[in-house]
Image (cartoon, helix red, strand yellow):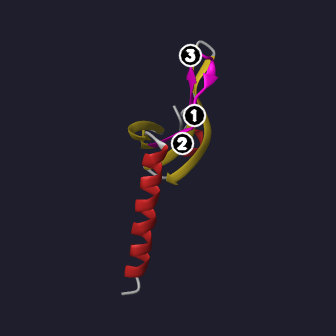
Amino acid sequence: MAETVEELTITYEEDGVVLSKELEKQVLTKGAWATVMFLYQDLNRQTGEFGPNKVTIRRYQKRDGSYLPRSKFNISSLDQARKIIEALQKWTVEEEGDSGK
């Protein structure tokens, strides 16, 4: 169990074989509730090679000194990622424009 946000990982291993490999991590929020975005790859068991890059956003709650997973959202495709980026860019520009009112 992770006691700090920096220790959180989605690298997953079974019987000495890495099945999910974390490539990068971006901590979005810290505290009693932490939000972390991971870039990762899953192992294709048939070929023995890692597949395409994937992104997941995970929420953790700190209880009794350890972070426990509470929810996750997997970005399922490049198309979905582009749509999320476009919406966030639009909304943040609109928000910046509204702040001057």
Instruction: Residue at the far bottom: name it.
Output: 101
- N-terminal of the pair, mark 2 or mark 3, is 2
What segment is highlighted magenta in the picture? 41-57
Q: Nearer the viewer, residue 10 or 93?
A: 93
- N-terminal of the pair, mark 3 or mark 1, is 3
- N-terminal of the pair, mark 1 or mark 2, is 2
* Residue picked out by circle 1: 52
Q: In the image, is residue 56 part of the stretch drawn in magenta?
A: yes
Which amino acid lies under the numbered mark 3 shown in the image of this protein? Answer: Arg
* Residue picked out by circle 3: 45
Residue depicted at x 56% and y 49%: 26
Asked if marks 2 and 3 touch (Cβ < 8 Å), the reply is no
Residue depicted at x 39% and y 67%: 91
Task: Point out residue 18 in the picture as x, y percentages from the top left corner.
Answer: 61, 22
Alpha carbons under labels 3 and 1: distance apart: 14 Å
Task: Point out residue 39 in the picture as x, y percentages from the top left corner.
Answer: 56, 41
Q: Nearer the viewer, residue 4 or 44?
A: 44
The residue carrying pointer 1 sits among few (fewer than 14), some (14 to 19) or many (20 or more) residues within 10 Å by Cα, namely: few
Alpha carbons under labels 2 and 3: distance apart: 21 Å
Which amino acid lies under the numbered mark 1 shown in the image of this protein? Answer: Pro
In the displayed structure, would residue 14 be above or below residue 22?
Answer: above
Alpha carbons under labels 1 and 2: distance apart: 14 Å
Secondary structure state at the residue bearing disc 1: loop
Secondary structure state at the residue bearing disc 2: strand
Q: Quadrant of residue 61?
A: top left
The residue carrying pointer 3 sits among few (fewer than 14), some (14 to 19) or many (20 or more) residues within 10 Å by Cα, namely: few
Q: Nearer the viewer, residue 74 or 15?
A: 74
Can you tell which mark lies on residue 82?
A: none
* Residue picked out by circle 2: 38
Task: Point out residue 55 in the picture as x, y percentages from the top left corner.
Answer: 51, 41
